[in-house]
């Protein structure tokens, strides 16, 4: 085999390798190509996900507002309870003082 034959055989081998690579690339591209229906489905899924995230954010905001309202109501109720307990304590003291006064009046 002389030099010219070697160059031709090498060129043929490289051309065949190129053709096989191009064919393999075409096959892979053909089987992994995304169809328009799949793109439409992906768009619908993305829209649904976006809507679900918005709904979740609204629900979280509502729950935070509701929690703040309930916490405020609880604080007010606790303050009213403390005031009522203080008033009851004063009323009991006054009732006890009145009992003591009445007993002293009855004894004398």
Image (cartoon, grey):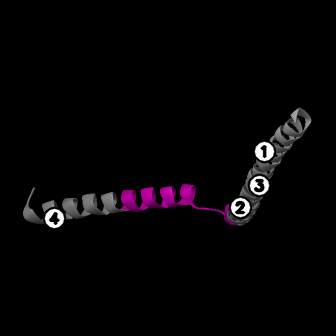
Circle 2 or circle 1, nearest the eye: 1
Residue placed at 33% from the left, 58% from the top?
16
Residue 45 appears in the picture as rendered: no
Left or right of residue 79: residue 19: left
Query: Residue at label 2?
Result: 68
Front residue (pair 27, 8): 27
Left or right of residue 60: residue 34: left
* Residue 105: image location, x then y, percent: 89, 40
Cα separation, mark 3 vs mark 1, equals 15 Å
* Residue 76: image location, x then y, percent: 76, 59
Residue 87 appears in the picture as rendered: yes
Front residue (pair 58, 39): 58
N-term mark: 3 or 1: 3
Residue placed at 38% from the left, 56% from the top?
20
Cα separation, mark 2 vs mark 4, equals 84 Å
- Tell me, yes or no, whether the two marked residues, 2 and 4, touch with CB atoms within 8 Å: no
Q: Which disc, if any, is residue 83?
A: 3
The stretch of residues the image draws in magenta is 19-43
Query: Residue at label 4?
Result: 7
């Amino acid at each position: 085999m002389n030099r010219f034959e070697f160059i031709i055989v090498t060129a043929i081998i490289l051309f065949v390798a190129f053709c096989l690579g191009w064919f393999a690339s075409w096959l892979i591209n053909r089987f992994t190509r995304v169809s328009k229906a799949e793109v439409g489905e992906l768009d619908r899924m993305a829209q649904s996900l976006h809507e679900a995230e918005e709904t979740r954010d609204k629900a979280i905001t509502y729950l935070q507002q509701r929690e703040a309202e309930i916490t405020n109501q609880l604080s007010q109720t606790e303050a009213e309870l403390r005031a009522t307990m203080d008033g009851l304590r004063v009323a009991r003291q006054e009732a006890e003082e009145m009992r003591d006064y009445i007993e002293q009046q009855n004894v004398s």
